[in-house]
Structure formats: C-alpha cells, structure tokens
Amino acid sequence: MNDAERKFNELLNSSEVRKTDFKRDQYRLDNVPLKSDFIKDILCIANAPGDDGFILLGVKAEKGKSLEVVGISHHHDGSDLEQIVNSVIDEPIQFEYHSMSYKGKECALIHIPKSKAKPHWPKKDFGVLRKHVIYTRRSSGNREASIQEIREMCISTIHISDIAQRKAKTSAHVVDELTNLNLDERETAMHRMLKTIAPKIGLARYRHIFNPISSRHWCTMVSSKGKKIDLNYAVFMYPWTAGGHDIKVSRYNAASVKISTGGKRIWKSTKERLAQSTLIHIAYKGISTKSLESKAFDSRGYWFANEWKLDWGRVMKWEDTIPKYIGDKAVYEDKSKYEFFLPDVASKGELQDRLNKLLGWVDQNLSS
C-alpha cells in the first residue's frame, strides 16, 4: 500500500473537517460551470487555514461523516486538472491526483499541500467564480472569505525565518551596480557579470552571440550539467524594463540566427544548439509578460500550459504535440518548452543568487 492509499484509508475513518471533503461522484468537466465548481473546491481548500487538504472521490458521506465507498466510473489526468485550475487563478496551486482501488472499486484522492502563496483567487470571471473574489472553506462549506480571514491568510504565509532571509538578501545585494551606466554600457556590464559568475554556479560552454548589424550582444549561450538533467540556455539581457515585444524579438533571434555574427561565422552545431535552447530573460528592471499570457499560442507555435511565480522569478511552460513516424504511422508525442524570467537584477550578487535558484528548480522539477 502506497502513501496515498494509506492516507485514503485513514481519512475514511475521520469526520469531514475544514480541509477534508468527501465526494460521491467524479468531477464532471463538460462545460465552464462544472469546471468552475471543481476549481472552487480546490481554491477553498488551498485558502483554508491548517495543514494539507484532501478530497476523496467515490465516497458517499452524510453530514461530514464517511458512510460508504461507492467508487467512480473514470479518472482524470492530474496534469489536465492542474492546468484547468491554474489557467483561471492568479497564483498557481500545486496539487496531486492519485487513482486507486478500494475493495474492488475505483476511487481517487486529491492531495492539496499547504499553500505558501495564499490567498489564491480567480483572475477572471469563470462560471460560478467571480474575478478577484477570495474563497475559503469553513465547517459549513465553501464561502467567500471575510476581511479577517483574508488578513489571516496573508499573515500565515509570512514566517520569521522568511523575514530574516529577505533581510539578509537585501543587505547582500542592496547596492545597484548598474545605475550610473547608459543602456549600452549596462547591457555589456550585465553580460560581463554573467561571464564572471557562470563557472561558480556550474554553467559552461559560455559563448556570446552577436547581432551582425550592430555587433552588440544578441544573447549569451551557456550550458548546465545538473544532477538530473542537462540543458542549453540562451540568456537575453535587457538593460531596462522588458516588454512582450522584447521577448518575442529574442525568441525570433534564437530561432533564426544568421550565418554571420560580428564578422565571424557561426558553426552549424552552434546554430542548432541556440535554436533548441531554453530561454532565460534577465532585466535590470521589471519584465512585463502580460501580452504573452493573454495568447493561447506563442510565436513558435507552442500553446500556453502553465506558469509558476517564485521568489526568484517566473517560469512559463509551453507545449506542442509533434509527430514521430514509425514507418508510415505517425505517433504523437508531447513536447514541452520552458521559459524563465528574472526581473529587477541590479548586481552580480543578485544575479548569482537568482540563477542558482533557477538551476535548482530545473534540477528538482524537470528531471527526465
């Protein structure tokens, strides 16, 4: 018996409380209202105080007490469920869907870990959900949160250790090393900082790619050798605030770099490596991705799948389905592409700290 099955059995013998819910039937996702009911349940449990939350599917209950395991007729894919939720809410919620068999009947356990990013809320009107309204779960069921409950959600995500860490981080990187430079000088300095710290954080095969017309940097290419996954990165530097147009131009440059760079010929292998690289966007000030998020597809033909807002930056995930031919038969495989955004980088120490966390996230989440 695995951990999810043990937890399912344990919860069957407990009363339904604020962060545990029993559902007789599988969620229906045929239309927007039904999807919004599912999203609301996840939102309410994620926003409720306490530890991890759980939803048991296939369990008939009355007045919060588990009565009978009746089973469900089918299962959903966990990644599809996560995509449905995170396409509607502002701060992503990470949860897990576990399918299992209980005494010959198909059941499921949805595990919603305690959130460190609450409150979560809908970023748009969607079915029964209203934009920017915060929902939570009380003993009497799902409700709109009161002002006091919202205040408690915000306070609960701040810990003394976090404050100390932020203070230490601010002290270490408080100096703006780029403020007295013009845009060209600042861009060059940012690339120089990357070159200095690259070997310290495990980035190798460092190479500048130049614009053949202006001889300015297009980007820097580096490679990481992680514990679980190796990746090539194309790193684009923006000396001020980067917008959606800047990101699209960088994508185009990475995909269609020409033969000549600053009077030197690019080897074919380098061009291929650049075209297949994972993109990192680093800005001296902010990065606006609003125009990217509003479109289902990006300029490369990938569709938007998910995003993560983290303390060191933002991750966007894009996906495509490509055919792989076995003889005359096409077998379609999902292909994912990730994109990283690091805004407000004003010093070498800040850049090193943020890139280190980015590489750690890659190692932990993108293992093959």
Image (cartoon, rainbow, N blue to C red):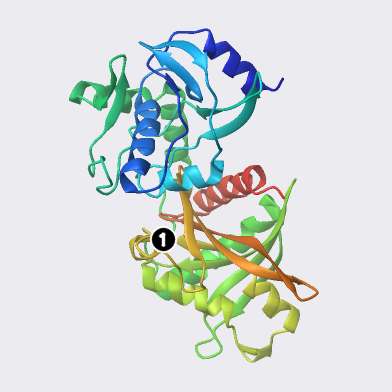
User: In the displayed structure, would residue 93 be above or below residue 12?
Assistant: below
Name the residue at 44% across, 38% down: 93
Three-letter code for the amino acid on which mark 1 is drawn: Tyr
Q: 101 or 77: which is nearer to us?
A: 101
Identified at 52% across, 67% down, the residue is 302
**Could you say where residue 65 lies in the image, as x and y percent from the top left?**
42, 9
* Residue 159, horizontal then vertical, whole percent: 41, 23
Q: Is residue 191 visible?
A: yes
Q: Is residue 174 visible?
A: no
Locate residue 243: give its quadrant.
Answer: bottom left
Residue under the image location 33 percent in, 33 percent down = 119
Q: Nearer the viewer, residue 93 or 116?
A: 93
SS under mark 1: loop
Graded by Cα atoms within 10 Å as few (under 14), some (14 to 19) or many (20 or more), the crowding at tag 1 reads many
Residue placed furthest toward the right: 327
Vertical order, 79 against 60 (above or below): below
Would residue 108 be found to the left or right of residue 227 on screen? left
Q: Residue 360, how many percent across, how many down?
A: 63, 44
Q: Residue at coordinates 44% horizontally, 8% vertically from top-left?
A: 15
Q: Is residue 146 above or below residue 315?
A: above
Viewer-nearest residue: 245 or 187: 245
Q: Report the front residue among 307 and 335.
A: 335
Image quarter for residue 183?
A: bottom left
Q: Position of residue 188 (x, y in %)?
A: 51, 71
Vertical position of residue 40 compared to residue 237: above or below: above
For the N terminus, the image quarter is top right
Which residue does the numbered mark 1 point to in the structure image? 284
- Numbered-mark total: 1
